[in-house]
Every structure is written in C-alpha cells, then in structure tokens.
Amino acid sequence: MGGYCDRCDLLVGLDGLHVIGVVADAGGRLTITVESAAEPMGCPSCGVVAHGHGRVEVRLVDAPAMGRPVRLIWRKRRRVCPEPACPVGSFVEQDETIAAPRSKLTTRACRWAIQQIRREHASVNGIRRQLGTGWRTVWESIQPLLQRAADEESRFLGVTILGVDEHVVRHEALLFRMEVRDLHRLAGTAVG
C-alpha cells in the first residue's frame, strides 16, 4: 500500500490520522478516508498491550472544504485485550478531538457549525444544507455543546454591563417590515 502522504495529512488536518483515499462523487461531495498508524496501544481498563483485531469504518460528516460538503470515513482500529481477567475484552480506538463517541459530525464540523450560527447568523437549516446532511443530524450534534456553553457561569466573569445592539435590532425590525410590506403588495397584486 505504501506510506502516508504528509501533504494530504497536512491539508486534511486531523492530528494522528493519515489520509489513505479521497474521492468526489457526481454531486461534488468529497469523501476522505483516514486511519491511524499501527502503534502499540494499551487496554483502557487494565493497561496490558492489546492485539489488533481488524478495523471498523465510522462515517462522519466533516466541515466543508473548498466549497464542498465532506464525508470522513475513519477506519478505527479494533483491539482485543489478551488479559483473561480484564472486563473489557475488545475496544475500538477513540479520539474526541476528532469525533465524540457515537457522533455523526466531527468535532471540527460541530465547531464550524456553531461559528456559522454565532458569527454569520446562519440557521441550522442553512448549516445542514452546506454540510449536505439532515437538520436533526446537525442539531443533535451541536445542541449539547451549545447547552454546555450556556450553562457555563464563568462566561459572565468580568462582565459589568450587558446591553443590546440597537443598530442590529432596528435593522432586523426594518427587514421584517419590508418583508411584510412585500407580502401585502404581492397579495394585493394577486387579488387585483
């Protein structure tokens, strides 16, 4: 199979994972296949060096790249603990910097989605369209992160005054009035 491509790994930017394949489908979506290098790993329960036991492919939605939706196929290593007294038996590699366990979005895609909502005023529907996935997939991935941030009381440390940006409020109200006016104009034209 040959070695890994350092340039590809740098471009994809997932520490500890190596690109082993990239394909684009007819719609332009990129699918990037990655895996970790073969290295000894201890059992997370007892610490005994585990044996390799194949791989499991996990499909994830990643942040868009070069204007395209991206799917990531992470070929996770499955390991078996040789210690008979160990309660674990077998386990699959995990790395929450890449994706939370049982998540459908990468950690990077979750961060990207939240930034789009906060900085670009994007809707969850707009985010799902850019990611090429479903609304529920996006919301179920980012909602716990948003809730954790909202519950974090330390975000108010050092805040002495809280205000409302009246320019934004006026701008939004003006846009709403313009939309309502346009709807009335369209209704009047349709009737007349």
Image (spheres, rainbow, N blue to C red):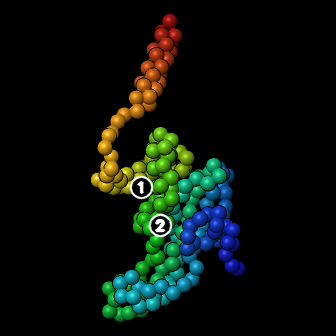
Q: From mark 1 to mark 2, how far is it between C-alphas? A: 14 Å
Image x and y of residue 97, in percent: 47, 66
Quarter of the image where one finds residue 84 = bottom left
Q: Amino acid at mark 2?
A: Thr
Q: In the rendering, at what x and y percent does residue 185 appear?
A: 49, 13
Which residue lies at the image location 65% right of the left edge and 55% below the top edge? 25
Is 19 left or right of 92, judged from the image as shown? right
Q: Is residue 10 visible?
A: yes
Near-viewer residue (149 or 44): 149
Query: Which residue is at the front of the view, 65 or 58?
Result: 65
Residue 150 visible in the current orientation: no
Q: Secondary structure at mark 2?
A: loop
- How packed mark 1 is, by other alpha carbons closer than 10 Å (few <14, some 14-19, many 20 or more), is many
Quadrant into which the N terminus falls:
bottom right
* Circle count: 2
Classify mark 2: residues with Cα within 10 Å, few (<14), some (14-19) or many (20+). few
Residue positioned most to the top: 192
- Identified at 38% across, 85% down, the residue is 89
- Check whether the beta carbons of the residues at disc 1 and disc 2 lie within 8 A of each other: no
Q: Residue at x 52, y 81 (%)?
A: 54
Residue 160, by quadrant, is top left
The answer to whether 144 appears left or right of 122 in the picture is: left
Name the front one of labels 1 and 2. Answer: 2
Does residue 117 sit above or below 48 in this rendering?
above
Q: State whether residue 171 is above or below residue 190.
A: below
Residue at which label 2 appears: 97
Residue positioned 51% across, 59% down in the render: 108
User: Which type of secondary structure does the marked residue at label 1 adopt?
Assistant: helix
Sequence-first tag of 1 and 2: 2
* Amino acid type for the residue under numbered disc 1: Ser
From the top left corner, tell me how far across and down residue 64 is, in percent: 58, 53
For disc 1, the marked residue is: 141
